[in-house]
Amino acid sequence: MAVKNKRQPKSLSAGRPPTLQRRKSISRKATKALISKHHVLEKRKQQAIAQGDRVKEASIDAEINASGGLESYQEASLQGQRDDRGGDSSRVLMKWLESSLSSQKAPSDKPLRLLEVGALSTQNACSKSGCFDIQRIDLNSQEEGILQQDFMERPLPRDSSEKFDVISLSLVLNFVPNPKGRGEMLRRTAQFLHEPDRYLASPTLTTSFPSLFLVLPAPCVLNSRYMDEEKLFAIMTSLGYTKTASKTTQRLVYYLWGRDPSCPTIGQTFSKTELRSGSFRNNFAIVLE
C-alpha cells in the first residue's frame, strides 16, 4: 500500500500561495471568537517561550491544534473578507491608488511591484487589477509565529530590482505576537520600499508611491491601553512615513503611508507606556528600540 507523502510546511516567502478553499460559512460571532482565541493562545505561547517553559508551550500548542490551528484562523479571516462582512480590504487600497494608476502608467522598464504579506487569496482586488507584479508571502504554514520570523529573516534588498512600490500589511501586524516584533516589522518595511525619487519622471506616481498599506482591527488603535492614533503617527513618522489616506470603520482601521524623505529618521524609541486606563481596554502595543 502506497504511503502518501506528508505535506511539508511552506515558508511565507515561498511565493504565490495556493488558493484556500472556503468551507461552510460560520457566523460573525463564531468567526470573531475563533480569531480572538487564536491571538490569546499565541500570546500565551510567546510568554511560555520567553519563560523557557517547554511543558506549558507544548500544552498551548496542543490547544491551538485542537481548535483547528492556523488553518482555522485563515478560514475565519477569509470569512471576514466576504462582502457581507466588510469585504476585501485591498479594494480600499485600489480606490486610494486609482487616480495615480489611471492617469499615468509606470514606465515599462520599472513595473509597479507589490509585496503582499499575509496573503490569503489570489482573487482580491489587487490581484485582479492587472496593475502590479505581485509577490506574496502567505500564511500557509503549520509553524505558528512564522509570519514574523520569516519577514524578519528575509534578506534585505541588494538593489532597486528587489524593492517594491507598495507593501500590504492587511491584518498582519496584529498577528505578530509581541510588541517588539511589530515595531521591527514596521521598521523593515521602509527598507523594502523604493526611494521616493524613483518616480520623478512620472509625477502622478509620486502622490501614491512608494507606500505602505496598513490595516488593523479598529480596537488595536481605538481601544488599546498602549496605542492610539497619535502614538501610531509618531511611530510611523520616526520611520520616515507620512499618512496619505485613512479610513475607519466599526471593525477596521485602514492607512496608506507614503515614504517622506523630509521626515527625520533619528532612531527614536517608543516603549510600552499606558496611554488610557480601563479594564475594558486591550493590550495591543508597538515597541521600537
Image (cartoon, helix red, strand yellow):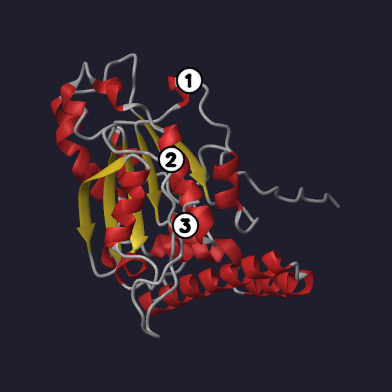
Mark 3 closeness class: few <14, some 14–19, many ≥20 residues within 10 Å = some
- The answer to which quarter of the image holds residue 85 is bottom left
Relative to 281, is 113 above or below?
above
The residue identified by callout 1 is 159
Relative to 226, is 215 above or below?
above
Q: In this orientation, which residue lies closer to the viewer: 244 or 134?
A: 244
| Circles 2 and 3 in contact, beta carbons < 8 Å | no
Q: What residue type is labelled 3?
A: Val
Q: In this orientation, which residue lies closer to the viewer: 261 or 248?
A: 261
The residue identified by callout 2 is 189
Viewer-nearest of labels 2 and 3?
3
The residue identified by callout 3 is 287
Q: In this view, does 217 lie to the left or right of 177?
A: left
Q: Tag count in the figure? A: 3
Mark 2 closeness class: few <14, some 14–19, many ≥20 residues within 10 Å = many
Q: Which amino acid does label 1 sit on?
A: Asp
Q: Earlier in the sequence, mark 1 or mark 2?
A: 1
Element marked by disc 3? loop
Position of residue 267 measured from the top left corner of the image (x, y, whole percent): 43, 43
Element marked by disc 1? loop
Q: In this view, does 167 lie to the left or right of 10?
A: left
Q: In this orientation, which residue lies closer to the viewer: 37 or 184?
A: 184
Q: Earlier in the sequence, mark 2 or mark 3?
A: 2
Query: In percent of the image, x 44 and y 55: which residue is there?
Result: 173
Q: What residue type is labelled 2?
A: Thr
Relative to 79, is 2 above or below?
above
Position of residue 207 measured from the top left corner of the image (x, y, whole percent): 19, 33
